[in-house]
Image (spheres, rainbow, N blue to C red):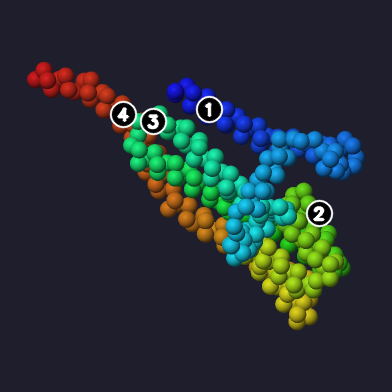
Amino acid sequence: MAILGAAALFVLIAIMGAVIGLRVWVRPQEAIERVTGTVPTHEELPVHPSLVFHDLVKKLGNVMPVNPKDAGVIQRRMIRAGIRNENAMKIFYGSKILLAVIFPIVMVLAVAKSEADPANKVMAILAAAAAGFFGPNEYINIKARRRQKEIRRGLPNSLDLLVVCVESGLGLDQAMVQVAKDLEQAHPEISEEFALVNFELKAGKRRIDSLRNLAERTNVDDLKKLVAVLIQADRFGTGVAQSLRAHSDFMRVQARQVAEEKAAKLGVKLVFPIFFCILPSLFVVTVGPMVVRIINDLLPMMNSI
């Protein structure tokens, strides 16, 4: 029975890996469109396992009841994570249901022949179900934090380039477009956000509204400060180049202060690694030979006396 359970677990993991590989790497629909040069209709598309799995996840997402308030919060998190697919919400809720079913099944197969307490087995199965249900939420949060970190990292370079473009005679809108083009490879996240601001301006939105949407989409404090500076410069008629130059100097000073603060904390943070990792090995190297010599030479002499 143990061999049968292990075989079933192996088959389940293999099927999941094959489905994920077909969905992520093969992408049959894009391959068909690339070869034929046209978008085939549903009658022309072959039935492919990855497409069936994709449709299954979306159908499961449609079945699950959704609170509009929670849906709005999750949608904002998805936008901050850079996920803007129209079917993202359906896939998200469908993956929650699917993982909440698959994880307990895998856990049941894993603990079926275990000699652990039955209560612990039940807790492990419930924990697997909870991990499968709340796992997509944590994935989105991690991806959003990672994207915010990348935006925060690329903001100083984009701000310096924005200052150069504005001081060279370009308007703020054209400067954002130029920054989005120049930083497309180095910092694609902030380039995408500036490009979205340009699209909103072309769609007819006011500049203030587009900048506020930029701050709301990213939820990065440094970018919110930049948006506040641009809105004040646009509202009160001050020079945009002068405001950007002052804000760039402020951010550079702030970055230097943050680096100095981290450097000051380094000594305190090194206490525990030094105490638990370096000092024991140092004691072994320095005191160890002396202890061995005492055991080999002094103790026999004391016993002989």
Task: Compute the Cα span from label 3 to label 2.
Answer: 58 Å
- Precedes in sequence: disc 2 or disc 1: 1
SS of the residue under disc 4: helix
Dot 3: element: loop
Tell me which numbered mark, 3 or 2, is placed earlier along the sequence: 3
Question: Residue 256 or 159: which is nearer the viewer?
Answer: 159
Q: Is the C terminus in the top left, top right, bottom left or bottom right quadrant?
A: top left
- Between residue 239 and residue 114, name the one nearer to us: 114
Image point 77% across, 77% down: which residue? Answer: 234
In this orientation, which residue lies closer to the viewer: 201 or 5? 5
Residue ID for mark 4: 288
Q: Earlier in the sequence, mark 3 or mark 1?
A: 1
Q: Is 59 on the left or on the right of 32, as rendered?
A: left
Q: Mark 3 is on which residue type?
A: Ser
Residue 175 or residue 290, whichever sits in front: 175
Q: Residue at x 56, y 60 (%)?
A: 258
Is the residue marked by circle 1 packed among few (<14), some (14-19), or many (20+) residues within 10 Å? some
Query: Given this view, does label 3 or label 2 mark the residue nearer the observer?
Result: 3
